[in-house]
Image (cartoon, rainbow, N blue to C red):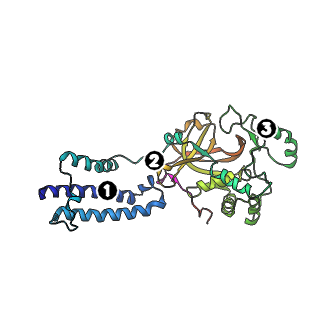
Amino acid sequence: MQPSTVKRHYIMRSLILLGFTLLLADLIVTGRLSHYLAPRLHMLSYVTVAILALLTAVSIRQAVVGPDSYECDCGDAHKVPRSPFTALVVYGLFALPLVMGLVLPDKTLGSAVAEKRGVTLLTGEGKWVQSVGSSTKPGSDQAGSPAPDANAMTDGTEKAKGAGETGNTTVSGNGGPGRSDAPEKAGDSGSPNQSVPQTDEQIRQRFAANSFGDFYTDIAVSLYKQPVIHLDDKLFLDGLTTMELYAKEFAGKELETLGFVYREPGFTPQQFVVARFSVSCCTADATVFGILVEDKAASKWATDSWVKVRGKLELRSVDGYDMLVLKASRIQPVKAPKDPYVYYDFNAAAP
């Protein structure tokens, strides 16, 4: 093969390598890499872009200088494509994803993906922790036990009133998630006990009895001390798990969080989920977590729009389990965060 032909092949390879190097570097510099990879994998991307830059430099040198001889004594093993069609196919396999990455805009995951994968409403991880917690306490029926049924709550209404306690609201089979068969009454939202502990140790005693571990107890204490619980990106996943584990303790607390609006076919016009995608490694393994929100004007918020929601947590019984529902008092539109995904943070309880 003519040296000029070989040089053209090296030029093509250099351009492809340079394109991938610049594309990955741009994703890193602009912060858009989080749209594709979890932060814990970003270091691998830094190493990759360095290797790509080195390969690009070597390929450019070969294109400029040209190979005078084969140093490894294996010339036929490194031959370039001989026919134009073969070259087009080989280089096209690399050029196509590069062009797509440079031309197509970034798109975050939304309701279309959430509908296929399903959304987790204060469940999942918490259910697993509950089962572990209950297995460490033989004879205990508190952790992970189903909520009392409607008849049991009706029979104990007078006792609950006398003791200053509040019963759970039973879910209607036809009213959608979190819907009640009985009309709601003021003060029947499962609010916390009126004698609220003030010290950290007193608050810890409220949560330590369930034996879910110091990690979730620390988060529970940190959240409970806040007059309004701010469920930010750092605390979103661990906060949801904690509030599921201690649903009765957090019922009646004020909460504020943000996410995208998601709806399922069975929802009523007054319901939507404020949801976030959780990414473990990359967006291919993304799962959806969220809180069911109820508001009279919920229907005016478009699906996939980003909102900040503030309201009071109410305890409901859904499929035999306690679930917290956010009764919204304020909903406002917000811009999607720069990194729209949330991640588990094992230092979430740290100040």
Q: What amino acid type is highlighted by mark number 2? A: Thr
Q: What amino acid type is highlighted by mark number 1? A: Phe
The residue lying toward the viewer, choosing from 197 and 35, is 35
The answer to whether residue 267 of the structure is visible from this angle is: yes
Residue 17, by quadrant, is bottom left
Relative to residue 108, is residue 245 drawn left or right? right
- At a point 62% along the width and 42% down the height, the residue shown is 293
The residue lying toward the viewer, choosing from 340 and 19, is 19
Proximity of marks 2 and 1: CB atoms separated by less than 8 Å? no
Tell me where residue 159 appears, x and y as whole percent. 87, 45
Q: Which residue is mark 2?
A: 108
**Label 2 to label 1: alpha-carbon separation:** 21 Å
Q: In terms of sequence position, does the residue under pointer 3 or pointer 2 come before the other? A: 2
Tell me where residue 237 appears, x and y as whole percent. 59, 54
The residue lying toward the viewer, choosing from 218 and 321, is 321
**Label 3 to label 2: alpha-carbon separation:** 42 Å
User: Which mark lies nearer to you, 2 or 1?
Assistant: 1
Q: What amino acid type is highlighted by mark number 3? A: Ala
Stretch of the chain drawn in magenta? 335-344
Q: Is residue 307 above or below residue 236?
A: above
Numbered circles on residues, count: 3
Q: Is residue 148 above or below residue 182?
A: below
Q: In terms of sequence position, does the residue under pointer 2 or pointer 1 come before the other? A: 1
**Label 3 to label 1: alpha-carbon separation:** 61 Å
Neighbourhood count class around disc 1 (C-alpha, 10 Å): few under 14, some 14–19, many 20 upward: many
Proximity of marks 3 and 1: CB atoms separated by less than 8 Å? no
Mark drawn on residue 150: 3
Relative to residue 215, is residue 118 drawn left or right? left
Which quarter of the image is occupied by the N terminus? bottom left
**Element carrying mark 1:** helix
